[in-house]
Amino acid sequence: MAGTKNGGAAAAKTNKSKYGADFYAKIGAMGGKKGHTGGFYANRDLARIAGAKGGRISRRTKASV
């Protein structure tokens, strides 16, 4: 039943029984530790500019007059 909700639940149950209840926490932590670019933490000015750009973009529709 690959690709179904029930199949995913069965796979999760199998993974947890084979590798421990914290299986998904461990693989998530591994992925988080692999990054070395720094993201916006490395360039605060760039973060400020990007945040300002995002803030100017309205998600509301314009009121028709």
Image (cartoon, rainbow, N blue to C red):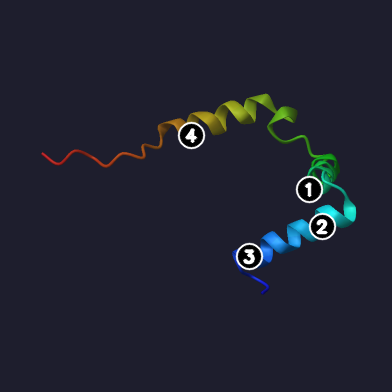
The image quarter containing residue 40 is top right
Residue at the spot of label 4: 53
Say the numbered circle drawn on residue 6: 3
Above or below, comparing residue 60 to residue 19 in the picture: above
Question: Between disc 4 and disc 2, whose residue precedes?
Answer: 2
**Real-space Cα distance between discs 3 and 1?**
18 Å
**In front: label 4 or label 3:** 3
Which corner quadrant holds the C terminus?
top left
**In front: label 3 or label 1:** 3
**Real-space Cα distance between discs 4 and 2?**
42 Å
Residue at the spot of label 2: 15
**Numbered disc 4: secondary structure:** helix
Question: Between disc 1 and disc 4, whose residue precedes?
Answer: 1
The image quarter containing residue 18 is bottom right
Seen from this angle, which residue lies furthest bottom?
1
Seen from this angle, which residue lies furthest right?
19
**Real-space Cα distance between discs 3 and 2?**
14 Å
The image quarter containing residue 1 is bottom right
**Real-space Cα distance between discs 1 and 2?**
9 Å
Above or below, comparing residue 61 to residue 50 in the picture: below
**Real-space Cα distance between discs 4 and 3?**
42 Å
Q: Position of residue 57 (x, y in %)?
A: 40, 37
Above or below, comparing residue 12 to residue 57 in the picture: below
**Numbered disc 1: secondary structure:** helix
**In front: label 1 or label 4:** 1
Residue at the spot of label 1: 24
CB atoms of marks 3 and 1 within 8 Å:
no
Alpha-carbon neighbours of circle 1 within 10 Å: few (<14), some, or many (≥20)?
some
Pick the front one: 22 or 51:
22
Question: Between disc 3 and disc 2, whose residue precedes?
Answer: 3
